[in-house]
Image: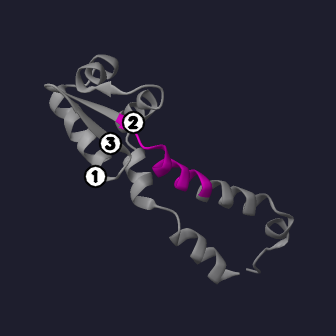
Amino acid sequence: MIWQHQSMMTSVDTDLIRVLGDPLRLRIVTLLATETLCTTHLVAETGARQTNLSNHLRVLREAGVVETEPCGRFTYYRLVPERLEGLSETLADLAATARSTQAEQNRRAC
């Protein structure tokens, strides 16, 4: 059982959790879930400074969470849902394991 537990933990994308753990980045992801937005829109929606927002968008791009689309002198950002689905499925599997009767009956002796 210990090996299975360690195996499940290593399959969780901790880098992605760290990326999404920042409140501003999570806000950006939430906004991009409903529409493709340019930096100007994101500044207006979040109230963040342009330089701060650009740094967070870079982190999201490097993590594969968002993609860019140049449009004239603007850059539009869109969410990559598949990147979030993998994390969602892993967390759902962990929750299902915790709910299972086998997990409830498994208790290590102290």
Q: Position of residue 30 (x, y in %)?
A: 46, 31
Does 105 sit left or right of 20 as displayed?
right
Q: Nearer the viewer, mark 3 or mark 2?
A: 3
Q: Position of residue 25 (x, y in %)?
A: 36, 38
Q: Position of residue 9 (x, y in %)?
A: 55, 69
Q: Secondary structure at mark 2?
A: helix
Say if mark 1 contacts mark 3, CB within 8 Å: no
Residue sitting at 79 percent across and 58 percent down? 99
Q: Secondary structure at mark 1?
A: helix
Please name whichever residue, 39 or 3, is drawn nearer the observer in this view of the structure: 39
Image quadrant where residue 2 sits:
bottom right
Q: Position of residue 101 (x, y in %)?
A: 86, 65
Please name whichever residue, 97 or 35, is drawn nearer the observer in this view of the structure: 35
Q: Main secondary structure of the magenta part?
A: helix
Q: Residues within 10 Å of mark 1 (few under 14, many from 20)?
A: few
- The residue that label 1 is drawn on is 62
Does 72 sit left or right of 67 as displayed?
left
Label annotation for residue 42? none
Q: Nearer the viewer, mark 1 or mark 3?
A: 3
- The residue that label 3 is drawn on is 67
Identify residue type, mark 3: Glu
Q: Earlier in the sequence, mark 3 or mark 2?
A: 2
Q: Which residues are magenta?
A: 78-89
Q: Earlier in the sequence, mark 1 or mark 2?
A: 2
Residue sitting at 58 percent across and 51 percent down? 88
Please name whichever residue, 12 or 34, is drawn nearer the observer in this view of the structure: 34
Q: Secondary structure at mark 3?
A: strand
- The residue that label 2 is drawn on is 23
